[in-house]
């Protein structure tokens, strides 16, 4: 009670800062992926995922179909495009600011022809849908919130592209 010690809340460390931990259930699949693709690096993949996350969220907010088509599977792009079209038909725009994003691989699935990696993103972001007068009904104070997203990226082994396409999205409440 008389100490000057203040207990701070636990902060999640970045993957590159983590110490040796218990084996993950997907380590075997990750090892097989590295063996089949010598250029694959978990650290580089996660760094690229964070950049892709920001690019996808901001491209969605800015209705940038060209950028989204490059990063999303046809099925996911179709859903994103429908949401953008609905927003535009309602004369609404989206504002988005991402202050922080961190990524962690939570599962890896391999088939004979492809690899899928499920990633959990933890981010601090401000999203607001605004009408033609600039008024937001879903976030009028433009407050930032913690968001947890689970995204699945997929790449076929026969592809000459190094891009992992986003094939599934889920959101959780932080």
Image: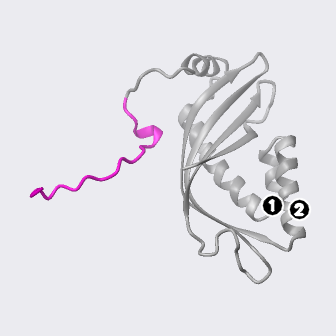
Going by the image, does 125 lie left or right of 37?
left
Relative to 136, is 14 above or below?
Answer: above
Q: Distance between the residues labelled 2 and 1?
A: 11 Å
Going by the image, does 164 lie left or right of 102?
right
For image coordinates 63% across by 43% down, the residue present is: 49
Relative to 115, is 147 above or below?
Answer: below
For image coordinates 45% across by 43% down, the residue present is: 14
At numbered mark 2, what does the secondary structure look like: helix, strand or loop? helix
- What is the chief secondary structure element of the magenta stretch? loop
* In-front residue for pair 33/149: 149
For image coordinates 83% across by 65% down, the residue present is: 87
Residue 90 in percent (x, y) is at: 87, 71
Relative to 95, is 28 above or below?
Answer: above
Q: Is residue 14 magenta?
A: yes
Q: Mark 1 points at which residue?
A: 64
How packed mark 2 is, by other alpha carbons closer than 10 Å (few <14, some 14-19, many 20 or more), is: some
Relative to 106, is 36 above or below?
Answer: above
Q: Residue 85 carries which label?
A: 2
Residue 126 in percent (x, y) is at: 60, 65
Q: Residue furthest left?
A: 2
Q: What stretch is highlighted in magenta?
A: 1-19
At numbered mark 1, what does the secondary structure look like: helix, strand or loop? loop
**Would you identify the image quadrant in which residue 61 lies?**
bottom right
Going by the image, does 6 lie left or right of 88?
left
Q: Does the magenta stretch include residue 94?
A: no
Residue 64 in percent (x, y) is at: 81, 61
């Amino acid at each position: 009670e008389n100490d000057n010690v203040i207990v701070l809340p636990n902060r999640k460390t970045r993957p590159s800062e983590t110490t040796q931990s218990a084996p993950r259930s997907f380590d075997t699949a990750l090892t097989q992926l590295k063996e089949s693709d010598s250029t694959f690096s978990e650290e580089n993949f996660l760094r690229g995922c964070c950049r892709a996350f920001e690019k996808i969220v901001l491209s969605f907010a800015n209705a940038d179909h060209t950028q989204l088509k490059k990063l999303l599977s046809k099925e996911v792009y179709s859903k994103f495009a429908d949401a953008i079209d609905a927003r535009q038909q309602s004369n609404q725009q989206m504002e988005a600011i991402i202050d922080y994003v961190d990524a962690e691989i939570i599962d890896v699935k391999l088939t004979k022809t492809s690899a899928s990696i499920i990633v959990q993103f933890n981010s601090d972001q401000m999203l607001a849908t605004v009408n033609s007068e600039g008024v937001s009904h879903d976030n009028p104070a433009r407050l930032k919130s913690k968001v947890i997203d689970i995204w699945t990226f997929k790449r076929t082994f026969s592809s000459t592209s190094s891009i992992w396409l986003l094939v599934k999205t889920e959101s959780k409440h932080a």
